Image: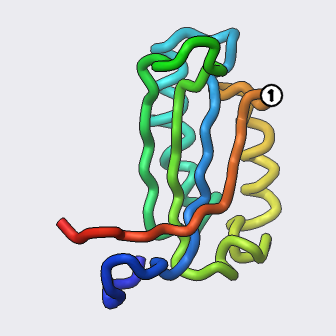
Amino acid sequence: CPDRDWPDGARSPGVTHFTWFEKAPQISEEAFFHHWFDVHTPFSFELHPLRCEYIRNAVARSLTPNAPPVRAIVGERFPELRDYTDPQRLFGSANVLAKSAAEAGDFSDPNALHSLPLSQYIIRSM
């Protein structure tokens, strides 16, 4: 991502692809984490070659009653909006995209996968 040269409270350049999902129901916790961390994560650098930040968060439990199950939250940052909105820039190649679609259900539940584009604001520097 670009070196920070904007003030606190201003919108950061680029965009964050924010995703949350449940593990595939047919696999164990151990298999889920193995596939997510050891198989998908290295592959994701091919899938999104212009991505400049990748943050994985495992969810231990829901805090509110009747919350939908979520096992993982991921933030992927792209330096420019066009890196996210242009499919040719977002994805490495058609072959890589096809491989991603084929492996998605290996560790995540495609029916419980959600994504949103988000803006980032740094309210106060640490």
Q: Is residue 6 above or below residue 16?
A: below
Q: How many marks?
A: 1
- Residue 73's spot in the image, x, y percent? 52, 39
Q: Residue furthest left?
A: 126
Residue to which mark 1 is pinned: 111
Side of 9 where 116 appears, left or right: right
Residue at 46%, 35% in the rendered image: 38
Residue at 75%, 66% in the rendered image: 93
- Residue 26's spot in the image, x, y percent? 69, 9
Residue 92 seen by the camera: yes
Residue at 54%, 25% in the rendered image: 71
Q: Is residue 38 above or below residue 6?
A: above
Q: Residue furthest bottom?
A: 5
Choose top left, top right, bottom left or bottom right for residue 28. top right
Residue 50 seen by the camera: no
Which quadrant of the figure contains the N terminus?
A: bottom left
Q: Who is closer to the viewer here, 65 or 114?
A: 65
